[in-house]
Amino acid sequence: MTDTQSRSATGATPDPATAGASRRGRPLDKAVFGVAAAAVLAFVLWGALDPDGMGTVTTDTLTWLEKSFGWFFVLTTAAFVVFSAYLALSRYGNIRLGADDSEPEFSTFSWVSMMFATGMGIGLIFWGVAEPLTHLNTPPMGMAEAGTPEAARLAMEYTFFHWGLHPWAIYAVIGLAIAYFAYRKGYGNLISATFRPLIGDAAGRAPGKAIDVVAIFATLFGSATSLGLGALQITGGLDNVFDRGGESVALAIIVIWVLTACFVVSAVTGIEKGVQFLSNTNAVAAVLLVLFLFVVGPTVFILSTFTEGLGAYLTQLPTMSGRTGAFDEDQAAWLNGWTIFYWAWWVSWTPFVGMFIARISKGRTIRQFVAFVIVVPSLVSLVWFSIMGGSAFDLQLNQGQDLGTTLADEGTESILFTVLREYPLASVTVVVAILLIAIFFITGADSASIVMGMLSQNGEEEPKRPLIIFWGCAQGAVASVLLWSGGDDLRAGLTALQNLVIIVGGCFLLVIVAMCVSLVKALRAEPYESTLPSRVRRAVQYVQQQNQQEQHSIALTALGAEHHEIVPDAEPPADGAPAHGSAKG
C-alpha cells in the first residue's frame, strides 16, 4: 500500500492548518465565547429579576413542546438505540476512533467510571430510591393499584426504561460522531466539526459557531441545574444528620460554592489527574454502598426484583419505546411529565456528556464504544435501581412502612436518607451518600467546565485554565442566583431553569439527527480495509505489500535491472564475477 493509500485508510490526517493549531494550542474563539457568555448573563438576569415571568414563559413553552413534538422525542430516541446497534454489529464496528493502529488512552475501568460518573452519577443518587417509590405509590398512567405487587413490577419496568438503553444511546450517537470526526478525520473536538460532510467549510463559520454556542448554553444550564439539585439533596442529608439546615437558602448557596471550588480545582488539574482520580474513587465508593445494602438488606428480594424488573423491561421495551398516549389524554399527560421529560433532559445533556465521552474514547473501535457506552452503564444502572429500589420496596411492601407518605412529606431530596436510616450503620451510610452526591457532581461539573472550555477554544483538548475557571464559576453563579431568586421556595428558580434546559434540548435533538446523517455519510466513504477486523486488516495489508513488491520486481526485471537492484538485500557481484543472469564466456 502506498503512503497516500495508507493515510487514506487511517482516515486520520487533519488539514495542515488544523495540525499546526493543535501543536501551538488553539486560540480562543471570541465569537463563540462572547455570544455564549452574553446569552448566559442575559438569562441569569432574567431569572434573578423576574423569576415568575421566566417560570411562566418556560413552562408554557415546555408544555407546547411536549404536546406538539412528544412523538418526535419518542421516535428519535428509539431510532438512536437501533442506529447504535446497527453500527456496532455491522462492518463499521471495526473502525477505530483514530488511526487504524491507535491505542486507548485510558484503562477500561477508568474509561467506564468517567463516562458513568459524568453521564448519570448524581441522577442515580437523587432518583435511586425516589423514582421507584414514586411509581409504586402513584403507578404510571394508572395501570395498577398503588402499593400493590403489580405496581411494584410496573415501577421497576419504567424506572429501567428511563435509565437504561435509551438515554445511553442518546449519549452514544453524539459521542461517537464527535470522536470519529475529531480523532479519525482530524476535524477538531467540536460539535460543529461533525457537520463538515454536510455543510463543508461552513462548519467553521457562522452556522457551525451557532451550533457550538447552543451546545455551551445547554451544557452550562444543565450542569448548573444539577448543581442546584445536588445542593438541595446535600442540605437534605445534612438536615437528616444534624436535624437542621434542610430549608436554608444560605446553606444551599454555601454548598454550591464549596462544590464549585472543588470541581474547578479538579478541572484545572486535567482529565488524566483530577477527573480520572475522582471518577475511580466515586465508582469504588458507590459499589461499596450498594454492596453493603445488598448484603445487609433483603438480598433475595433484591435479586428477585432485578430478575422480574429486567424481564418486564425487555418484554415491554418495544411497547414502551413507541408509547405516546395518542388515544388517552391521561396517559399522554403522564408520559409528558416523565418519559418525554426524561428524553428531553438527556438530550439537553448530550453536548457536554457526548463531547466528554468522545474526549476519553480515542483509540476505541466503534463496536467497543457502543458496547461500553450503552450496554455496560445500562446494566450498572439496572443493578443500582434494583438494590436501591428493592431495599425501599421491602420496607413498604414487607415491613409495613408507609414510605409513600414520607416521600410526599419530605420530598425526593430526603427519601434516600430515610431509607438508609432503616438499615445498619446508618450514620456511616448517610455520610457516604452525602459524599457520593458531592463527588458525583464534582466529577460531572469539572467535565462540563473542560468541555465548555474546549468549545470556546476551537476544540482544544487542554483548554486554558482561566477559561475553565470562568465556566466553572459561571455554573456556581447561575445556580446561586436562581436559587436565591426563588425566595423561600428553593426550587422555584431551578424549575424554570430546568424547563429552559429541556427547551434547548428539544432544539438540539434536530442537531443530533443531522449528526447521525453526517456520520453515516462519512462511514460509507471509508476504505474497505478499515472496516475489517484488526488481524484481517493487517493480513490484507501484508499481502498487498508483498504483491506490490513482486510487481515492482517484475517491472525492474523487464527493464533489464541487475539482481541486486531488484532485491535490495542482495549483495552486488564481486569484481570479475559475472552478474546474475549474464551470459558466460
Image: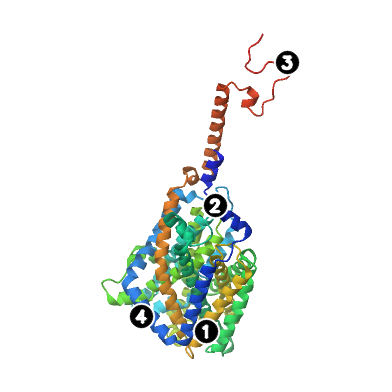
Residue to which mark 1 is pinned: 481
Q: Nearer the viewer, residue 388 or 490?
A: 490
Residue to which mark 2 is pinned: 15
The type of residue carrying mark 1 is: Val
* Gap between marks 4 and 2 measured at Cα: 46 Å
Report the quarter where the N terminus lies.
Answer: top right
Asked if 297 appears above or below 553 in the picture, the reply is below
Neighbour tally class for label 4: few under 14, some 14-19, many 20 plus, Cα within 10 Å: few
The type of residue carrying mark 4 is: Asp
Report the quarter where the C terminus lies.
Answer: top right
The type of residue carrying mark 3 is: Gly
Image coordinates of residue 438 in percent, x first then y, are: 58, 76
Which of pointers 2 and 1 lies earlier in the amino acid sequence? 2
Which disc is residue 60 wearing? 4
Tag 4–tag 2 contact (CB < 8 Å): no
The type of residue carrying mark 2 is: Asp
Image quadrant of residue 162?
bottom left
Which of pointers 4 and 2 lies earlier in the amino acid sequence? 2
Which of pointers 2 and 3 lies earlier in the amino acid sequence? 2
Which of pointers 1 and 3 lies earlier in the amino acid sequence? 1
Image coordinates of residue 525 in percent, x first then y, are: 44, 47
